[in-house]
Image (cartoon, helix red, strand yellow):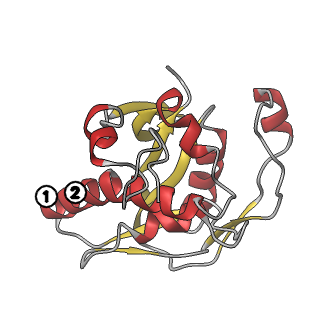
Amino acid sequence: MRCYSCHHLSFKTLCSECQEKLFVPTIRKRKAGSLEVISFYRYSVLEPLLLHKHQPEGYRIFKDLAKVTMKPFIENFVREDSKPVAIIGIDETVRGGYSHVAAMTRQMRNKLSAPLHASLLSQNSVNYAGKTLQYRLDHPRDFRYQGPEGIDAILVDDIITTGITLQEAQSTLIRHNVNVLFALTLADARG
């Protein structure tokens, strides 16, 4: 196999040299409405990798990126908080043979954090790529939640652009008495 960045031979999706020099996470925080969103990379850093989202190799890419970012983050979070927390992926619908968001949330499982796979699904599969804010507002995702109520949760998505999707997901969960602590994304399209 080859590194998806430098194309040198590697057993990993990203070779050790690229991980150490090119793909060093830099945590960014921003607000989407009342929701705090924590991202690990600028979108421009990950763009070539994220474009594999609905291709077979995307599963390994998203899994490996989550393993080096979201997994250590959640391990540190539950060590400090020590209360159980649910991990809820934004629309874990299977496309291209897998769900890229489920590949990420799966990496966050430990004794105090458990993914609630496919519990928050979009009823509207509109594609937001390259669309305006007004278009996004006019075509909501129409999320349906089918999971436990009265829990603490962390939302997970691949990218934050405008934050509209995360805000809509948070609103849906609040209606089901789910306390959304914050959201995690791999990349922030700002910057």
- Nearer to the camera, 28 or 53: 53
Q: Residue furthest top?
A: 191
Q: Residue visible at 64% across and 53% down? A: 53
Position of residue 157 measured from the top left corner of the image (x, y, whole percent): 54, 52
Against 172, residue 106 (above or below) is: below
Secondary element at tag 1: helix
Front residue of this view, candidates 101 and 151: 101
Residue 36 seen in the current view? yes
Amino acid type, callout 1? Glu
In three-dimensional space, the C-alpha distance between marks 2 and 1, rounded to whole angstroms, equals 5 Å
Q: Position of residue 26 (x, y in %)?
A: 31, 32
Asked if 77 appears above or below 21 in the picture, the reply is: below
Q: How many tags in the picture? A: 2
Instruction: List x then y, in percent, for residue 49.
Output: 54, 44
Q: Which residue is mark 2?
A: 77
- Identify which amino acid the numbered label 2 is placed on: Phe
Q: Which residue is mark 1?
A: 80
> Is residue 178 shown to the viewer in this render?
no
Element class at badge 2: helix
Which residue lies at the image location 49% right of the left edge and 47% below the top edge?
4
Q: Please name the residue shown 38% across and 67% down the image.
A: 107
